[in-house]
Amino acid sequence: MRKKLVAGNWKMHKNLTESQALITEIRGIVRDEFRQNDAEIVVCPTALALASSARLVEGSEIRIGAQNVNENKEGAFTGEWSASMLKSAGVSHVIVGHSERRQYYNETSQACALKNKAAILEDLVVLYCVGETLEERESNQHFDIIKNQIEQGLEGITGEEMSQVVIAYEPVWAIGTGKTASAEQAQEVHAFIRSLIDSKYGQAISQAVRILYGGSVKPENAKQIFGMEDIDGGLIGGASLKPRDFFEIIKAAQ
Ligand code: PEP
């Protein structure tokens, strides 16, 4: 049985004071209402708020994730931060290869492989994102695109290291658009991703790896999406900024 996981991606929202207020509110709801079988919870604030958020959730069920990591250990890389720096701030997870980073910062799957490796070597769990654009889906290229993203992004990751990898399938056309993939459309791609992991790493690892769905998940559609066989939780953008909605989504992922 794979434990479900729900991660909130705050993107570039909330200043430091607002972040502290938001994480405190989420922590309060989780403290009062979290039950043992609920999904694992990860919250990914901006880099600015990572260290203070990690302190504010100490002793709770909430883990803190970053939205990016540099592949180098240290050096002259202005504006960047390494996996060990994230770890020192109390971070346990990191999103790699989000479509916004692929689109606006030209991150390739090959670059993601280096980031994935660097994060894993520091004992972080990576939430590695893949997904096709609308154009790619409409021209029926989505399976090829996802195959390449998986193969290239996991290059150099060993079977043992796969216990620190979570995949997030996020069709680009569903992110922040209000358009959700149907549960069946998502399941089809999740099963395909699991089959790719199976070919590369074998059945035990493919059955253990968690594959999250992301793209306009809300309390109203979460249960149906999370009810599909190969969907092990969600990566949540907009709705993760609303504590009550975020918690309802967590509750839907049992
Ligand atoms: C995301 O940013 O990963 C995401 C899925 O966003 P939204 O839930 O807002 O579509």
Image (cartoon, helix red, strand yellow):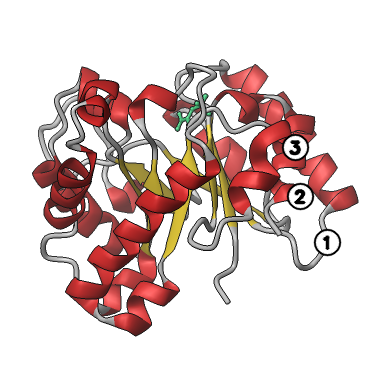
Please tell me the numbered disc located at residue 105. Answer: none
Q: Nearer the viewer, mark 2 or mark 3?
A: 2
Residue 65 rendering spot, x and y as whole percentages: 48, 45
The residue located at (64%, 27%) in the rendering is 239
Q: Nearer the viewer, residue 159 or 226?
A: 226
User: Tag 2: Cα neighbours inside 10 Å, few (<14), some, or many (≥20)?
Assistant: some
User: Which comes before the other along the chain, label 2 or label 3?
Assistant: 3
Q: Nearer the viewer, mark 1 or mark 2?
A: 2
Q: Is residue 109 visible?
A: yes
Please tell me the numbered disc located at residue 35. Answer: 1
Residue 50 rendering spot, x and y as whole percentages: 50, 37
User: Tag 3: Cα neighbours inside 10 Å, few (<14), some, or many (≥20)?
Assistant: many
Q: Nearer the viewer, residue 221 or 68?
A: 221
Please tell me the numbered disc located at residue 251. Answer: 2
- Dot 3: what SS? helix
User: Tag 1: Cα neighbours inside 10 Å, few (<14), some, or many (≥20)?
Assistant: few
**Residue 220 figure quarter:** top right
Amino acid type, callout 3: Ile
User: Which comes before the other along the chain, label 1 or label 2?
Assistant: 1
Q: Is residue 41 visible?
A: no
On the picture, is 157 further left or further right than 187? left
Residue 108 rendering spot, x and y as whole percentages: 13, 36
